[in-house]
Image (cartoon, grey):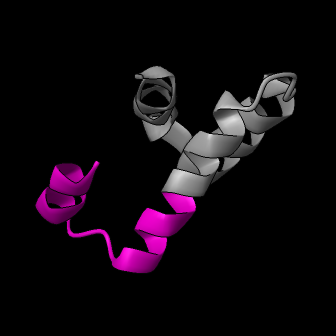
Amino acid sequence: MHEEIGRYGINRQASIYMQRLKCRWRHKGAPHTEMRLALFVLFGDDTDAILAWLEDP
């Protein structure tokens, strides 16, 4: 993740939020339907890339 942050210029606070999102995504029993909708609203056309990153171990 840190290489991607440097490459895309994401600040440290955004990095922390993205790591928390990944942790919540992996939390067993969490409803992904609502999270997918929220990601679509936030990231629009980039949602597929975000979902791929979330599901990457």
What residue do we see at 87% from left, 22% from top? 29
- Measuring from the top left, give residue 57's x and y in whole percent: 41, 22
What residue do we see at 62% from left, 49% from top? 21
- Quarter-of-image position of residue 34: top right
Residue in front for this viewpoint, 42 or 18: 18
- Measuring from the top left, give residue 5's x and y in whole percent: 24, 60
- Quarter-of-image position of residue 20: bottom right
What residue do we see at 47% from left, 26% from top? 48
Instruction: Say if the magenta span includes residue 42.
Output: no
Q: Is residue 33 left or right of residue 17?
A: right
Q: Is residue 20 left or right of residue 36?
A: left
Q: Is residue 2 left or right of residue 42?
A: left
Residue in front for this viewpoint, 48 or 14: 14
Give the mark count: 0
What residue do we see at 37% from left, 77% from top? 12
- Quarter-of-image position of residue 25: top right
The relative height of residue 11 versus residue 44 in the rendered view (above or below) is below
Q: Main secondary structure of the magenta part?
A: helix
**Magenta stretch?**
1-18
Residue in front for this viewpoint, 57 or 18: 57
The relative height of residue 2 versus residue 40 in the rendered view (above or below) is below
Q: Is residue 6 left or right of residue 30?
A: left
The relative height of residue 27 versus residue 23 in the rendered view (above or below) is above
